């Protein structure tokens, strides 16, 4: 009889624990995202460095504390920074920026991204359009806002005025909107 009661107790505890785990996963954050804050950011030094840093700072100040960045200026910190931003004249596919997420130390594969976290993100920003026309600082800022949002894991939104708009190529909004912050909060705050 005592053995039967003990087994019932164990079953009850296992069932209770399972319910807690399942309920917790129902309210999980969007993934992938960064596991810890601050996120270290290395931005290649050139005329657009401050413009790109200003874009990251706009996300941080608008996030209500959800995002914090640590800026590294020394080339020595490039390899150990979470996000690295570099510049090219033009990207081969004609896009204005590219964010390459890396989820593992070993490979760039999308392993466990449903439950996972970024290991490192590489951002490349073009300085010219596909036609060879130089982008202005204002355009670089808009592109950097969009790229920074992607680099921290913010999902696209259905608002054409938002930085993370489904229809944006990176030259859209120059202000972090409520829609952008709502998408950010789904990733980092509940």
Image (tube, helix red, strand yellow):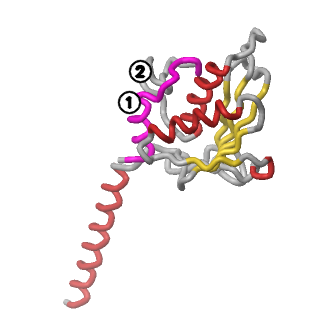
Q: Judge by depth and name the residue closer to the eye, 65 or 20.
A: 65
Q: Secondary structure at mark 1?
A: helix
Q: Work out whether residue 178 can be spotted.
A: yes
What's the mark number on residue 92? Answer: none
Residue under numbered circle 2: 159
Question: In the rendered image of this protein, does residue 107 appear above or below residue 141?
Answer: below
Q: Nearer the viewer, residue 58 or 160?
A: 58
Q: Image point 48% across, 23% down: which residue?
A: 165
Residue tagged by mark 1? 178
- Asked which quadrant contains residue 4, the reply is bottom left
Front-most of residues 189 and 77: 77
Disc 2 to disc 1, C-alpha distance: 10 Å
Q: Please check the rendered image and state whether residue 84 is part of the magenta-colored stretch, yes or no.
A: no
Q: Is residue 75 left or right of residue 139?
A: right
Q: Which residues are magenta?
A: 170-189
Magenta includes 178? Answer: yes
Residue 5 occupies quadrant: bottom left
Which quarter of the image is occupied by the N terminus? bottom left
**Where is 174 relative to 35, above or below?**
above
């Amino acid at each position: 009889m005592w053995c039967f009661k003990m087994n019932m107790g164990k079953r009850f505890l296992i069932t209770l624990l399972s319910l807690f785990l399942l309920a917790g996963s129902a309210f999980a954050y969007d993934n992938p995202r960064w596991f810890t804050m601050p996120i270290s950011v290395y931005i290649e030094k050139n005329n657009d460095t401050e413009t790109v840093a200003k874009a990251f700072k706009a996300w941080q100040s608008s996030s209500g504390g959800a995002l914090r960045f640590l800026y590294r200026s020394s080339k020595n910190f490039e390899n150990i920074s979470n996000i690295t931003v570099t510049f090219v004249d033009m990207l081969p596919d004609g896009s204005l920026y590219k964010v390459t997420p890396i989820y593992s130390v070993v490979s760039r594969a999308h392993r466990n991204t449903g439950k996972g976290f970024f290991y490192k993100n590489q951002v490349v920003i073009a300085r010219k359009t596909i036609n060879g026309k130089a982008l202005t600082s204002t355009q670089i800022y808009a592109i950097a806002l969009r790229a920074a949002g992607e680099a921290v894991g913010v999902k696209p939104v259905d608002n054409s005025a938002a930085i993370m708009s489904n229809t944006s190529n990176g030259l859209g909004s120059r202000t972090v909107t409520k829609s952008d912050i709502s998408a950010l909060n789904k990733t980092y705050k509940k």
